[in-house]
Image (spheres, rainbow, N blue to C red):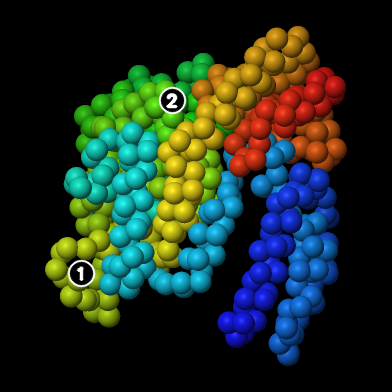
Amino acid sequence: MTTDQFRTLGHELIDFIADYRDNIADYPVLSQVEPGEIAGQLNATPPEHGEDLSGLVEDLRSMIAPGLTHWQSPNFFAYFSANASLPSVLGELVSAGFGVQGMLWATSPAATEVETVMMDWLVDLCGLPGGFHSSSNGGGVMLDSASSAVLTSMVAARYRAVGHRSAPELRAYTSNQAHSSVLKGMRVAGFADEQLRSIDVDAEFAMRSDLLAEAMTQDVADGYVPFFVVGTVGTTSSTAIDPIAEIATIATEHGAWIHVDAAFAGSAAVAPELRPRVNSGLEAVDSYSFNPHKWLLTNFDAAAYWVADQHSLTSAMAIVPEYLKNAATESGQVIDYRDWMVPLGRRFRALKLWMVIRWYGAEGLRAFVRDHVAIAQELSGWVDEHSSFERLSPTPFSLVCFAHVEGDDRTQEIVEAINAAGTHYVTHTVLNGRYTLRVAIGSVTTDRTHVEALWRDIVALG
Ligand SMILES: *Cc1c(COP(=O)(O)O)cnc(C)c1O
């Protein structure tokens, strides 16, 4: 492809994306295709001869778009949102255009240095502890996912506890509401399932720190070694908030590493009035992560991850083969992010975050999160006032969890009817054994009118 051909097709594709975003609310949010329907339209074998891609836009429109679930629709209320603001999309494009691989500072100094500054900007924007700033012993890195953050912390925690060896006596702890990535991380890191203890929660789905303390004390008495605790700020089911300060105190007494997973809710800390919910206790933790790709206007993938002690992470992860040795690394003056994560290679993710923060400014980011939280409080009020519905958990952020008072079958019918109608997309969870409708407010263009329309449809079915 010549650069002139690139220009022509590139302009056409930017127009296509802009039109797609303009019209996105017209599509059924949840894709209506049957399994195999999209694959059936593609040739079963690759083309022998190249082509000029002049039919590409039409193929995207007619073959691919029907097989999309429209995550960027303002009517997407399922799971948690996956923000892909337009400035972040452009940042992603530039990153691909540069095509650099920033595994070492030396392989693209800008990729490393912009990333370090962006992680420091987030410390500032979110009011995070100064111990996460790169000017301290700690620092941050951009990973692909919150799941990688928990795995990385787990490996660093094991190294701190016993060095590089497998250790069947080690025990990790998290609440029964924690994300499945904690158990998956244990499996990937080579632990047995019984090495992860599941701690019960209180009536608001927050980890009971008294039960954590009991479990750790009992394990020590039985000859086990507590090495790792995961607390959650904003659980996936209901955005419950574990008591991080209490958990950190208990974990520290036992010498265990404490990681806090705030994948969705972490973004809320851009609004100072929400910080007490998100940040309390973080000054005492070893590592922390949240996903700007969920609720901070940055397209997937962008997980922000900090450690309070860089050395505790890099000493666990660094392996320096001969072919990667270089003068900058040996000078000790630069960060080599490959020592902060599982993969060696890494893309220039910080560029899109730089574009997002410059475009919206701190003010724009605050307004974005505040709007969603305010709308969610309104929706909670409507649910509470309606005699057919009952809220099943508090609404500390912008996820509202509720059920029909007549029980699980009725609630499930409503979820299925809403999704079959196509205008909105919602998903469910189970809280205290009850089938629960989740309305997760967080998409880039969602405003009050979209939530009102959803509520009208729910009420009509109730
Ligand atoms: C979404 C979520 C995750 C997983 O995030 P990925 O970045 O997709 O790995 C982990 N923890 C919590 C609390 C989440 O809500």
**Badge 1 density bin: few <14, some 14–19, many ≥20, Cα 10 Å:** some
459 shown above or below 237: above
Residue 368: image location, x then y, percent: 54, 35
49 shown above or below 377: below
Residue 330: image location, x then y, percent: 16, 70
Front: mark 1 or 2: 2
Residue at (70, 9) in percent of width and height = 385
Badge 2 amino acid:
Leu
Residue 31: image location, x then y, percent: 78, 50
Q: Would residue 351 be found to the left or right of residue 417 on screen?
A: left
Q: Quadrant of the C terminus?
A: top right
Residue designated by label 1: 329
Mark closest to the chain's N terminus, 1 or 2: 2
Label 2 secondary element = helix
Residue at (67, 76) in percent of width and height = 8
Closest to the observer: 438 or 300?
A: 300
Q: Residue furthest bottom?
A: 49
State which quadrant residue 102 falls in. bottom left
Residue 157 in sight from this viewpoint: no
Residue designated by label 2: 274
462 shown above or below 353: above
Label 1 secondary element = helix
Badge 1 amino acid:
Thr
Residue at (59, 52) in percent of width and height = 86
